[in-house]
């Protein structure tokens, strides 16, 4: 599926085989679709046709024909609302032959067998689905209004066994005046980010975005634990990510107090990340209710702790005011709850100073780490049960390596050319069972990234228990992503994810674990948890989103058009990050600390002077520089420069004073260096007698300025 630019105020689409008349205020989008690919598939000794289409995903409930659906993420212009949506398709193109389209399999909690079932739809003599699209909803990202549609380019007439598809669709959205979302804060970086999320980035221009963020990260913890998080605050601030700490005594008690506080800091200080520094009794977690179901078979629901509540800051999460938060009609006006994050959240489930020190030391050690261990990736797969291809976790995990187009969607995976990828699979092991001692020795030898699919519980994951975690003694810390059940149930006292991340000074610095059941599909690798897992590494290696919290959220949002599919909403809610959301995967090295700036040390206000620096990047990446002029002003990121090339910039100061000029480097992947040592520049240099008198009269002011300015140098941007 491809989308072609949206055009505002286009009268007629000349080359289209059909017409929609567009008015002045309309948004027009044109989508094209590739011919479907049909593959034969044997399930339970019966032959089916599996229908795939490029850039589409299989959508439907268990037992319904499994057909591809496309997605449209459409940005609505600033201050506008939707009056009407019109979708028109081109000519129906019939495929030759007759087809037995396979039914949608049922999603399974890891460990329960269910076979696919067929429903009544298969007895009908009319096209299925009977429509071109569904409106998934309207969601907001930092005040940008995004309409999400699910498009149905492929249709099936069951009794005739015919398949046809549309090779193009036109979407017209009639607009009317509307309100501006209260979470719109008008930052330039927000505009850049939303442009990557939507099909019509040219509409971003309609939003007034001139502001710059003052802060990047908020840490929330208790008054008692605050000092243990200060080294992390300092580390981030020294790397160009201004960080602040707030304590619960300033915030309140409830999850709603926390969300309200985050919303205010988001709006007024421009933050993008929130680290929750406390287990649920220190910083509460919102318990969200979620159900996933198959109309024809059985139904699941649960209540789970979800920090998604602190990421998605729009509107209410309990519109009907009942006991269930997070229902699909619990957003403002009975619409869906907010599912697009304003800020990216991770949690350190610390209960004590000891836990907080473990967490902070491991996180900083990881962010400063180097060496060969960073190349090591371990895939950990277990036997899941007798489900055909889905019998082995390893069959799923293999799709995380390199590019995959399995199950009708594309993901960029962990590149085997850059990493040493080891597999620890029951599938390949003697007697189909690798022993726990094996994973202990792999972690102790140093491994960077672990991906896991197998059975788990609140106190059991990767075949390890709380007790066996004591046998870990690694000082090279890993990141763990596990699809398994309940390992991240941090409301169950202390779950195994908490042991990995905060209870020990070894093991993992961060990870993503499920709060409740993970879900795979039997006889297929198109599992719900797998969708998020594949998209997580696609975000990291395909989209170069290295901050863990952002990558976790990106893996959700790309799946948002499937939110009603089987257990997708359940998984959307439960993928909590146990770690610092602003920590970046060390899949590259940051540039070295830049050379102390060279240039004049004395000069006159108003004159323009040149300053020069240089640095190198171990990966030979292109480099950008940001200058701190010592007067509260900063340059933009200037570049790119080659590694080792010197970079020169001009600057003048309006006022007399003494300025500490320093510079930071960033590579093309966004890894930042430390600040350089400062060059102290004094203005003015040569003073006539009268100016000297004036200067003396300002002498005490200067001392005060010097005093005010210097303490900030090491702690923030
Ligand atoms: Ca409710
Ligand atoms: Ca939102
Ligand atoms: Ca806990
Ligand atoms: Ca680099």
Image (tube, grey):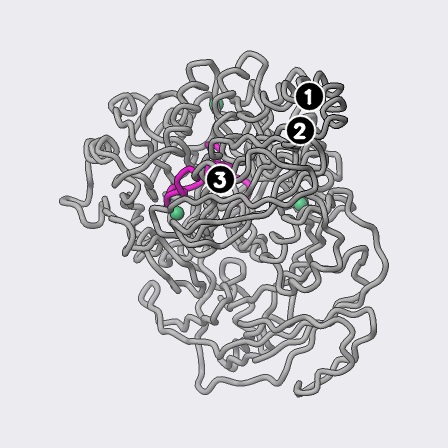
Q: Which residue is mark 2?
A: 657
Left or right: 141, with 307 as reference point: right
Q: What is the residue that sits farthest to the right in this orientation? A: 177
Disc sitting over residue 385 in the figure: none
Q: Which residue is mark 3?
A: 598
Q: Residue at x 62, y 58 (%)?
A: 195
User: Which is the main secondary structure of the residues drawn in magenta?
Assistant: loop
The CA span between labels 1 and 2 is: 7 Å
Task: Relative to 337, say whether 405 is above or below.
Answer: below
Decide if ligand 4 comes within 8 Å of the CB at mark 1. no
The CA span between labels 2 and 3 is: 18 Å
Disc sitting over residue 702 in the figure: 1
The CA span between labels 1 and 3 is: 24 Å
Determine the secondary structure under disc 2. Answer: strand
Task: Relative to 152, say whether 271 is above or below.
Answer: above
Q: Position of residue 630 (x, y in %)?
A: 61, 32
**Highlighted magenta segment, given as a residue range:** 570-594
Residue 592 lies in the magenta-colored region: yes
Q: Residue at x 80, y 49 (%)?
A: 180
């Amino acid at each position: 599926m491809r989308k072609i630019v949206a055009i505002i105020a286009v009268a007629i689409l000349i080359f289209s085989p059909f017409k929609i008349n567009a008015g002045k205020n309309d948004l027009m989008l044109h989508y094209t679709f590739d011919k479907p690919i049909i593959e034969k598939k044997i399930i339970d000794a019966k032959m089916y046709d599996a229908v795939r289409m490029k850039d589409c995903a299989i959508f439907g409930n268990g037992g319904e024909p499994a057909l591809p659906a496309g997605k449209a993420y459409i940005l609505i212009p600033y201050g506008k609302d939707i009056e009407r949506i019109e979708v028109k398709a081109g000519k129906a193109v019939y495929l030759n032959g007759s087809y037995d389209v396979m039914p949608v399999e049922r999603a399974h909690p890891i460990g329960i067998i269910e076979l696919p079932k067929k429903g009544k739809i298969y007895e009908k003599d009319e096209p299925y689905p009977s429509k071109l699209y569904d409106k998934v909803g309207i969601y907001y990202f930092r005040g940008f209004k995004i309409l999400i549609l699910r498009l149905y380019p492929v249709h099936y007439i069951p009794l005739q066994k015919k398949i046809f598809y549309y090779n193009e669709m036109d979407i017209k959205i009639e607009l009317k005046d509307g309100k501006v979302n209260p979470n719109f804060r008008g930052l330039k970086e927000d505009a850049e980010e939303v442009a990557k999320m939507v099909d019509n980035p040219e509409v971003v221009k309609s939003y007034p975005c001139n502001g710059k963020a003052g802060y990047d990260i908020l840490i929330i913890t208790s008054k008692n634990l605050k000092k243990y998080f200060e080294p992390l605050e300092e580390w981030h601030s020294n790397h160009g990510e201004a960080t602040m700490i707030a304590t619960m005594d300033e915030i309140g008690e409830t999850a709603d107090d926390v969300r309200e506080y985050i919303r205010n800091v988001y709006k007024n200080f421009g933050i993008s990340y929130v680290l929750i520094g406390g287990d649920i009794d220190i910083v509460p977690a919102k318990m969200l209710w979620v159900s996933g179901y198959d109309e024809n078979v059985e139904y699941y629901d649960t209540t789970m702790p979800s920090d998604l509540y602190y990421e998605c800051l729009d509107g209410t999460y309990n519109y009907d005011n009942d006991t269930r938060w997070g229902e699909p009609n619990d957003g403002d006006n009975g619409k869906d709850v907010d599912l697009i994050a304003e800020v990216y959240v991770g949690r350190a489930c610390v209960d004590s100073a000891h836990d907080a020190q473990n967490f902070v030391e491991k996180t900083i050690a990881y962010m400063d780490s180097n060496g060969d261990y960073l190349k090591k990736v371990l895939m950990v797969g277990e036997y899941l049960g007798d489900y055909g291809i889905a019998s082995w976790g390893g069959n799923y995990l293999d799709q995380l390596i390199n590019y995959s187009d399995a199950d009708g969607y594309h993901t960029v995976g962990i590149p085997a050319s850059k990493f040493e990828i080891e597999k620890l699979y029951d599938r390949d092991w003697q007697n189909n069972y690798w022993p726990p001692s094996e994973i202990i020795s792999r972690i102790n030898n140093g491994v960077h990234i672990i991906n896991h699919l197998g059975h788990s519980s609140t106190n059991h994951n990767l075949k390890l228990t709380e007790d066996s975690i004591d046998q870990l003694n690694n000082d090279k810390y890993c990141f763990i992503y596990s699809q398994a059940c309940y390992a991240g149930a941090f409301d169950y006292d202390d779950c195994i994810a908490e042991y990995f991340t905060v209870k020990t000074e070894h093991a993992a610095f961060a990870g993503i674990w499920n709060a409740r059941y993970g879900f795979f599909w039997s006889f297929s690798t198109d599992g719900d948890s797998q969708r998020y897992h594949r998209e997580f590494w696609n975000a990291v290696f395909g989209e170069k989103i290295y901050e863990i919290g952002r990558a976790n959220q990106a893996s959700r949002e790309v799946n948002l058009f499937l939110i009603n599919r089987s257990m997708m909403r359940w998984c959307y809610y439960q993928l909590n990050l146990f770690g610092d959301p602003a920590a970046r995967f060390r899949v590259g090295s940051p540039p070295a600390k830049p050379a102390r700036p060279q240039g004049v040390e004395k000069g006159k206000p108003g004159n323009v002077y040149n300053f020069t620096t240089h640095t190198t990047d171990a990966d030979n990446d292109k480099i950008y520089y940001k200058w701190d002029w010592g007067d509260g002003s900063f340059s933009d990121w200037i570049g790119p420069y080659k590694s080792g090339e010197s970079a020169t910039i001009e600057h003048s100061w309006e006022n007399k004073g003494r300025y500490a000029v320093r510079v930071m480097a960033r590579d093309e992947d966004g890894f930042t260096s430390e600040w350089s040592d400062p060059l102290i520049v004094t203005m003015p240099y040569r003073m006539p007698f009268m100016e000297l008198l004036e200067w003396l009269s300002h002498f005490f002011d200067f001392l005060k300025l010097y005093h005010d300015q210097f303490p900030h140098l090491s702690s923030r941007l």
